[in-house]
Amino acid sequence: MADMYAIFGSLILIGISYPAMLTAWWLLFPEKVEKARLRITEKPKKSFGVGLLAGAIAAVPTAVLFTLPSQFTQVLGWIW
């Protein structure tokens, strides 16, 4: 039962914090947000490809850190 509460609580926190973070960026950096919005609406395939490439590049060090036997490197993998 505690696992269910933990999962449900995590989903609620993510559901509240993600829109709040996007709103804060929009209020703090309106020019950058508008520039990013235009870039995504004009070239969605290129934006998706760049995000996919960045995710693939970030996955390699994460996989390496997780496979090392030290607990410290696994924590670094989670932080990465």
Image: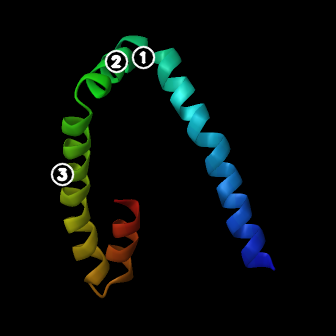
Q: Earlier in the sequence, mark 3 or mark 1?
A: 1
Residue type, mark 3 in image: Leu
Residue type, mark 1 in image: Phe
Give above or below for 16 relative to 53: above
* Whether label 2 touches label 3, CB < 8 Å: no
- Reading the image, the residue beneath label 2 is 32
Quadrant assignment for the N terminus: bottom right
- Reading the image, the residue beneath label 1 is 29
Q: Residues within 10 Å of mark 3 (few under 14, many from 20)?
A: few
Kindly give the residue lying farthest to the top in the view shown: 31
Residue type, mark 2 in image: Lys
What kind of element bears circle 2?
A: helix
Kindly give the residue lying farthest to the bottom in the view shown: 69
Q: Residues within 10 Å of mark 1 (few under 14, many from 20)?
A: few
38 or 27: which is nearer to us? Answer: 38
18 or 69: which is nearer to us? Answer: 18
Position of 11 compared to 25: left or right? right
- Reading the image, the residue beneath label 3 is 53
Give above or below for 22 relative to 68: above
The picture places residue 18, in percent across and down from the top left corner, at 57, 40
The picture places residue 52, in percent across and down from the top left corner, at 24, 51
